[in-house]
Structure formats: C-alpha cells, structure tokens
Image (cartoon, rainbow, N blue to C red):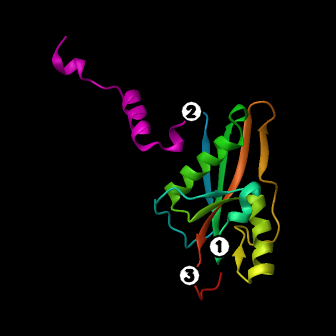
Amino acid sequence: MAASESMRITRRELYWMGCVVTAASSCAPNVRSVFRATDSTFSPNPGPTPRVYVESNLEEAPRSKMRSVGIIEITVPRSKGMEYAIKAAATKGGELGCWAVIEHGAFAKLQSQASLEFGASVELAHGAHGGAPALHPSSPAKKLSAEFDCVMQAPLGSPT
C-alpha cells in the first residue's frame, strides 16, 4: 500500500471530523433544525451561543426592547428529551446570531409581562399576541418537536 493511500480520508470521515471541530447541531444524528425567518431585514450573522429561556427560567430573561426575527424548529428523538432540544436550539441560535432564544409559548408570556411591568416592547415572530404551544409531537412514539423564537435586542429609541 502506498503512503498516499494510507493517508486518504473518506468524505464520511471528513464530514464527521468537521462535526467534531465545529460541534454544529446539524451534524448530530437525528436532530433537525429549521429556521423560518419572519423579518425580512434579518440577516444571519454567526455569533456566540445565546442563552435559551423556557417557562422554567423565564423570570431570568432580559427585560428590554426585543423583537423576534423568526422561528427555530427543533426536532429530536423523544428519548433525548427537552434538554437536548434546548441545547440544539442554542447551537442553531449561535449559528444565526440570535441575541437570545426563547421557547415560543414562553415568548408570548414574556411579551405580556414586559408591556405590563416594564413598558418594554416585545414582538412575536408572527406579529400576533399569544402563541401556539411550543411542543408538538411530530411522531407520537419517536420524535419531539419544539419551537423557539430567535430574538434580537432592539436598539433604544427604535420602534419594534
């Protein structure tokens, strides 16, 4: 066997090496992450991994002007659970450059609380008040699907 043949790396090996180096959520087996932009002015710009807020830690979410620029839908094996979906949402949020990632149902609550308590303005991705449930059984036995809002901080003085 020639030396060049022993050093040959297959495409599959290269793919998985890239996954290890970048730790991208899209490389994780059985994880599907889809971003649906709802703000035509939003341009993805990868950044640090944002914090994810769900019902259980919503009181820790920043109380400032913010706007949702789209929905991140994460589908994971049901056996992995919600924590796995949250980690995948954080990774996708970093790839997009989200300031924060907030569970879709919790974002509706945050919107109401912010306007009542702090006078801050928060917009849902679809422009309406309230929201659909954040968890959707995509296949009763095998998959768990969760929706999260990719949230950007609105500059002071700007309309949201």
Q: Please, what is the three-letter code of the amino acid marked with disc 3? A: Pro
**Sequence-wise first label, 2 or 3:** 2
Q: Give, as a three-letter code, the residue at label 1.
A: Arg
Query: Helix or strand or loop: what does disc 3 sit on?
Result: loop
The numbered mark, 1 or 3, whose residue comes first in the sequence reads: 1
Q: Amino acid under label 2? A: Pro
Residue in the image at 71% along x and 74% along y: 123
Q: Percent x, y for residue 52?
A: 63, 56
Give the magenta-colored segment's residue range: 1-28
Label located before the other in sequence (2 or 1):
2
For the N terminus, the image quarter is: top left
Image quadrant assignment for residue 19: top left
Disc marking residue 29: 2
Which residue is tagged 3? 155
Q: Is residue 117 magenta?
A: no
Q: Are marks 2 and 3 in contact (CB under 8 Å)?
A: no
Whole-angstrom CA distance, mark 2 to mark 1, is 31 Å
Horizontal placement of 133 versus 24: left or right? right
Q: Which residue is mark 1?
A: 67
Q: Vertical placement of 119 versus 151: above or below?
A: below
Considering the numbered disc 1 on the image, is that residue within a helix, a strand or a loop?
strand
Q: Nearer the viewer, residue 153 or 13?
A: 153
Q: Residue sitting at 72 percent across and 69 percent down?
A: 124
Alpha carbon distance from label 1 to label 3: 10 Å
